[in-house]
Image (tube, rainbow, N blue to C red):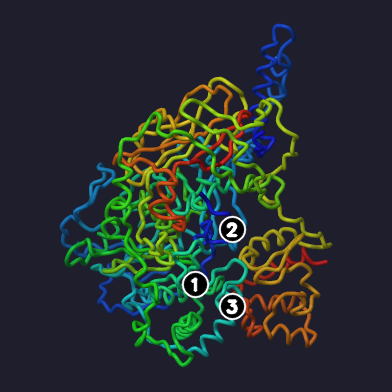
Amino acid sequence: MDDMFKPSRRAFLRGSAAVAAGSVAGAASADAGDPLITELQDWASATGAGVDETPYGLPISYESDVVRRNVEWLTASPISSINFTPIHALEGTITPQGCAFERHHSGAIEMRKEDWRLMINGLVDKELVFTYDDLMRFPRENHTYFCECAANTGMEWAGAQLNGVQFTHGMIHNMEYTGVPLRLLLEEAGMDITGDIKDKWLFMEGADASSNGRSIPLEKALDDCLVAFKANGEALRMEHGYPVRLVIPGWEANLWVKWVRRLEITNQSIEAREETSKYTDLYEDGVARRRTWVMDTKSAITSPSPQMPITHGKGPLVISGLAWSGHGKITRVDVSKDGGITWEQARLGKQGDTKALTRFYLDTDWDGSPMLLQSRAMDETGYVQPTKDQLREVRGENGVYHNNCIQTWYVNAEGIAENVEVS
Amino acid sequence: MSKSPNILFPALGGTVLVLGLSYAVAAGTYKATAFEPRAEAPVVAASATVEAPAAAAPAAVTAPVVLASATVDESVQPRGSKYGLGRAATAAEVEAWDGDVAPDGTGLPVGSGDIATGEKVFIEQCAVCHGDFGEGADAWPPLAGGFGTLADEDPYKTIGSYWPYLSTAWDYIKRSMPFGAAGTLTDDETYAIVAYLMYMNDLVDEDFVLSNENFLEVRLPNEDGFVVDDRDVLEYAQWRTEPCMTNCKETVEVTMRASFVDVTPADGGESVMNHGTTTELPTFTQNGIVYPEGYVAPTSAAAPAAAEEEAAAPAAVEATPASAGGLDMDLVAKGEKVFKKCKACHAVGDGAKNKSGPHLNDVFGRAFGGIDGFKYSNVFKDANANGMVWDEANVAEFLASPKGYLKGTKMSFSGLKKEKDIAAVIEYLKSFSQ
């Protein structure tokens, strides 16, 4: 017997109602039928809630387990910590703000739009201060991008650790941002550039206590970065940097400075704490990599997964998952049911967007046997998602960050999934 | 192959998430520039936008910057001239915010600090989280030691063993430390703390004085321990191959099962460890699944296993405060919000334990320094010996300015500025006090 941990009763109930209905419907000819159909239900008779009940709504109570979760023992304090998006239970590609993961270095601060100031200084013609009202008057754009913490899946370097795709891959979200291209603001201040722009940097910091100072090449800042003030149509949540945050497409989430307050054009990287002590990758030989900005091609199956067991038994099965690449568009995802011996090409939910989450599906049949489910993503640069062993071979196990390995779920004959490592 | 999980630390990537106590950055060197105000109106502190007057000449059109692969909205046309938005930053404003310090020393203010001062400030302000010797208290980061461990199975990364530049420490401490009271250290205190950090890491002697003048002479041991991201060289060529689709491996075995099988149990409590073994799982081959001896297929999903009662709400529920008669519950609710500033170090409610600070159940009527087993600072021990007892009045005074009321306290908090916040948090604490 493969001693599997049984997920919560609720996960089974989601499916078992369907099973029960199925078995009863099958007997409809013998009995009166499913009471849900044959008996007058309360919802078909009494009136429901009026339009004045909830000015801003949350999901219905039956979905109350679709929430962020945090793992207390990972960090010294929840003030400088992270939580995880419930990607096991989400579909499509847009992450609702309410359950999108958060990572703070000194807690999420409250600041009014009226109190927000953005300073641009350094190698500029004029050092400027902007208000939120100023920002509203520049041209704005809309782009959907994934935002992934470099430490996503970082726990798993040491082996299969956390049983749930929410925990192994949930330091990620995907939102449609509305913002002003960063280059417009820098151009407004006038860049005092002598010499090659390639030698110039942008130092970015936030208004919170941790300030999260980071340096990026000016070239990137002038490319596709946004000064964003809305996500998924509404104001940023407090925890995501209200009223204004930076969006640095395809690069690690720590660069997406929240409550951004200052941008400085410099001729060197400041080498701040978050780009030296942290967010650098230690290799086996003791030498560390820095400036590891781009998030590599990655994917994971979100269902079936430990929090999403198969409850319907044999027959048609939808395998659903997410793929993304900081290099550009996802072009293909393959799925394996036997731990990587054979692969089938999955279909994409829609054409992959550059540097955004892409949904993939494998519509397949389950014969009731155990499976080792894996997904393998490819992007437009030809990058193929590697295995954990391939990555460990190059980097060792102490890199902490940038673990984009192929993920494996062992699914037993009962439909329960577990996070495993395979040979 | 995999390491046995060390719950507590770095091997599991805990370091990235372990709290970094920030070091606040000093006001940087002032970059003298002549500013022309963009408008005639004076600098306005409120949110009113300053309109550029018609008289202000637009700046000359600058040559467009060559962009790298842009994924920008092509329909948005850059204006080609300034928008005339924003206003000139004042010298004082730039001085207030432009505090970053670069590895070549740019941004360092004039100042100095010696080891003795550093030790004093460190013990007062830093040791509560970082340990008296920089070894880290609870799960807060260590700051000293670990030399030569970077290639070990479990590297010990500290300022001394891992950080490349001393400027980073100065920058971070001045701007973001101590945790909970960022920005309250002076330039000289910061120099002193950084000097003491060097001393704790055996990089300088006890007569060392650190200043802006000798700053660049101090090099950290791991300065050359970094290379720039070389994934494009070491990895991308390897990964950019046509992927295999059939018979890609001979066999596949499970080599490790999830260590924590229920990470956040519905009823709260610790993560549940896995008792499953890899040998009881089947092997996958090119010709199908091979089951181990004694394998028994589990029963179907229609009969879920012995039901665990579903917890109602997934979110952790705070212990209901004891309802003392006459509490203003609205004020208690407000106080709970204020208490968020305290939560990093103090717990309340059922089962509250001491953390960096003592728990605050039954604080009213408690003797100063009155929790057994908590390591109080000397000033608290003295107050205890003098029979001082907490009441609403002295709690209010303390919270307005902890170091003002009780000089020498280790508590890193500059104080609650608003009287109504103090009143609210007191009401909240009263709800945990009999």
Which mark's residue is nearer the viewer, 3 or 2?
2
Q: Pick the quarter of the image with the N terminus of chain A.
A: top right
Q: Amino acid at mark 1?
A: Gly
The label number, if any, that marks residue A26 in the structure image: none
Residue under label 3, please give it: B127
Observer able to see residue A209: no
Q: Amino acid at mark 3?
A: Ala
Q: Are marks 1 and 3 in contact (CB under 8 Å)?
A: no
Mark 1 and mark 2 on one chain:
yes
Q: Are marks 3 and 2 in contact (CB under 8 Å)?
A: no
x and y percentages locating residue A115 in the rendered image:
46, 63
**Side (left or right) of B330 relative to A200:** right
x and y percentages locating residue A43 in the rendered image:
69, 24
Q: Find numbered disc 1 in the image and state the secondary structure of the residue it sits on.
A: loop
Residue under label 1, please give it: B146
Cα separation between marks 3 and 2: 25 Å
The vertical placement of B251 against B343, above or below, is above
In the figure, residue A380 lies in which quadrant? top left
- Residue A112 or A350: which is nearer the viewer? A350
Which residue of the protein is positioned furthest toward the bottom in this rendering? B207
Crowdedness of circle 3 by 10 Å Cα count: few (<14), some, many (20+)? Answer: some
In the figure, residue A354 lies in which quadrant? top left
